[in-house]
Amino acid sequence: MPKATEKDLVPPNPPLDAPALKDKKLCFSYEIGRGEMGVLSFEPYKSLILPFWAFRTVPIAHKSAKALWSIFESYVERGDFVGADMTRKYIQMGMTRARRYANHKGGRKYGNDGQQLEKWTEDDVDGKRKEKEEASELFKRYWRRCTSSEKYLQIKQEWTKSKKDFIKAQDAGASKAS
């Protein structure tokens, strides 16, 4: 997949599809997990949201974070917790990946031997480290907006309850079939 450029990072219009609103099985197969868990594997949301995620430069990170925030808000407005949470994870991943590049030249934390690579030691003459730090902070501000959104927290609570009810109904149906 080609790397996103600034012009590619425009909030989608019309809004992205919300498959979890149409498919209960898909909706409740989603796991919130820890941090960014599942962000690069939970389809079809991965393919829908990934093209809007980039952090190479501060202007690109700014457009990406803005587009992702728009996507997040759209999912929250429609009550699609899965889409909103996946988007929150991409915003969080922008923060953590940019921070990793700020901390480790080349963005790799571990070498091929599994040993942790050294952090930056030389001066940041070309400004790349500072740029990644700024990109990380930018995503961090949007991530905090996501995690403090009252509507997001409300649909998260509703989704969690609905998932428990769905699983209970599935289990009851399975035990009747036995």
Image: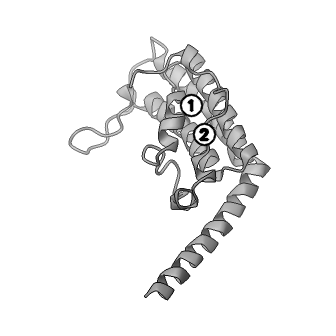
Is 117 above or below relative to 133?
below
Task: State the image coordinates of residue 8 (x, y, percent, origin top left).
Answer: 55, 18
Residue corresponding to mark 2:
17
Give the camera-side residue of 120 and 141. 141
Q: How is the image coloured?
A: one colour
User: Mark 1: which secondary structure?
Assistant: helix
Residue corresponding to mark 1:
136
Q: Is residue 106 left or right of residue 67?
A: left
User: Mark 2: which secondary structure?
Assistant: loop
Is 126 above or below relative to 146?
above
Q: In this view, does 31 lie to the left or right of 145?
A: left
**Residue at x 79%, y 51% (from the top left corner):** 150
The amino acid type of the residue labelled 2 equals: Asp
The amino acid type of the residue labelled 1 equals: Ser
Which tag, 2 or 1, sits closer to the chain's start?
2
- Nearest to viewer (mark 2 / mark 1): 2
Q: In which quarter of the image is residue 52?
A: top right
Crowd rating for badge 2 (residues with CA inside 10 Å; few <14, some 14–19, many 20+)? few
Task: State the image coordinates of residue 131 (x, y, percent, origin top left).
Answer: 53, 20
List the single residue furthest toward the top: 126
